[in-house]
Amino acid sequence: MPIVQVHLLEGREEKDIKNMLVEVTEAISNSLHVEKERVRIIVNEVPSSHWGIAGVSRKEIDMNKKK
């Protein structure tokens, strides 16, 4: 049973995440030749304050862009 973990910054539309689940399931099913019902996907939404880039949180980067 394939298990896929996807880490995303929070804030995406629920419909976009649902679409991603469908497409990733399809890709895994096709590439590994397993039934879709056996594919598991875990989506972890990470707050921008907990996502660092070069020692700075994504939240800080976004706030500085708005200035």
Image: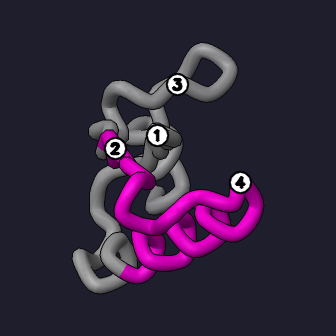
Instruction: Return the residue at label 4.
Output: 32
The magenta-colored residue range is: 19-44
| 16 relative to 48, above or below | below
Q: In this view, does 4 lie above or below 37?
A: above
What's the amino acid at mark 2? Ile
What's the amino acid at mark 3? Gly
Secondary structure of residue under mark 1? loop
Mark 4 and mark 2: span between their CA atoms?
18 Å
Mark 4–mark 3 Cα distance, whole angstroms, equals 33 Å
Q: Which mark is residue 1?
A: 1
Among numbered discs 1 and 3, the one appearing first in the sequence: 1
CB under 8 Å between discs 4 and 3: no
**Prevailing secondary structure of the magenta residues:** helix
Nearer to me, 53 or 30: 30
Q: Name the residue under label 3.
A: 52
Residue underneath mark 2: 42
Q: What element carries label 3?
A: strand
Question: Dividing the picture into quarters, in which one does residue 15 lie?
Answer: bottom left
Earlier in the chain: of badge 2 and badge 3, it is 2
**Mark 2 burial class by Cα count in 10 Å: few <14, some 14-19, many 20+:** few
* Mark found first going from the N terminus, 4 or 2: 4
Q: Which of marks 4 and 3 is nearer the N terminus?
A: 4
The tag earlier along the polypeptide, 4 or 1, is 1
Q: Which residue is drawn at the image coordinates 70% and 69% (left, top)? A: 30
Q: Residues within 10 Å of mark 3 (few under 14, many from 20)?
A: few
Residue 26: image quadrant is: bottom right
Identity of the residue drawn at 32% across and 40% down: 44
> Disc 4 vs disc 2: Cβ atoms closer than 8 Å?
no
Was residue 39 drawn as part of the magenta stretch in this picture?
A: yes
